[in-house]
Image: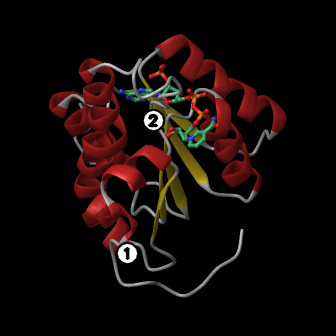
Amino acid sequence: MDNTPKPKVTGKTAVITGGSQGSGRETAFLFARKGYNVVICAREPARLQSVADEIVKAIPTASVLAIPTDITQRDSVDDFIDIISDTYESVSVLVNNAGVCLSGSFADTTLEDWDSQVAVNLMGAVMVTQGLLEPLTESKTIHHSLDASAGARTIHPLLLMPVLEPGPSTSL
Ligand SMILES: NC(=O)c1ccc[n+]([C@@H]2O[C@H](COP(=O)([O-])OP(=O)(O)OC[C@H]3O[C@@H](n4cnc5c(N)ncnc54)[C@H](OP(=O)(O)O)[C@@H]3O)[C@@H](O)[C@H]2O)c1
């Protein structure tokens, strides 16, 4: 058996949480069109994989990896980070997009609703960002961590802070 480690994928890599629908799906298409390796995660595997398949069908040169993950679960996030770190040389962009949007009135919103929003929009984004700090730092191109969740910004403005020193500027 050949135990030689597989070479890691080079080039710019964008990681997008909540990539199976909505703005996460559109963001995954955007980065794939721009030539990034794309990694997407969400909990429901079939819907997530179908987005990866759609991207490759539309952009045959695209490199897309779908990793079923629940960003509220530490073990699941650890597995997600391990797969990314083992597969890619570095990560250039992290889009913390997965989120729960509370749409009812304050009076109708339960403590359980708030808990679930904090778990995904705040702590999920924190866990993924913390786990990817090293691969983000190793990127010699750009380092961006973007937060799509209005809820997280409302709950914790610290998530607006730059995670890393800014790299050379880029435009998408
Ligand atoms: N739509 C709006 O008007 C609006 C406005 C302001 C801010 N936002 C924020 O923008 C982001 C995207 O919004 P959207 O409307 O495109 O969302 P969406 O259509 O509801 O999609 C949410 C995505 O997040 C994933 N997700 C949810 N919980 C997760 C978890 N625990 N672990 C991993 N993935 C999870 C979902 O897949 P699974 O269910 O399979 O996990 C799905 O892929 C959210 O953070 C939202 O709060 C949206």
Q: In which quarter of the image is the C terminus?
A: bottom right
Q: Which of 56 and 111 is in front in this view?
A: 111
Seen as rendered, the residue at the extreme left is 75
Q: What residue type is labelled 2?
A: Gly
How many labels were placed on the picture?
Answer: 2
Q: How far apart are marks 1 and 2 (CA)?
A: 20 Å
Q: Do the residues labelled 1 and 2 touch (CB within 8 Å)?
A: no
Q: In which quarter of the image is residue 109?
A: top left
Task: Name the spot of residue 111 as percent of width and height, x first.
Answer: 25, 23
Say how the picture is coloured: secondary structure
Which residue in the structure is indicated by mark 1? 162
Rendered position, 48 above or below 32: above
| Residue 14 visible, this angle | yes
Horizontal side of residue 100 vs 74, given as left or right: right
Which residue in the structure is indicated by mark 2? 99
Q: In which quarter of the image is the N terminus?
A: top left
**Marked residue nearer the N-terminal end (1 or 2):** 2
Q: Which of 6 and 64 is in front in this view?
A: 64
Q: Quadrant of residue 79?
A: top left
Rendered position, 116 above or below 139: above
- What residue is at 58 percent from the left and 51 percent from the top? 37
Q: Which amino acid does label 1 sit on?
A: Pro
Task: Name the spot of residue 96 as percent of width and height, x first.
Answer: 45, 49
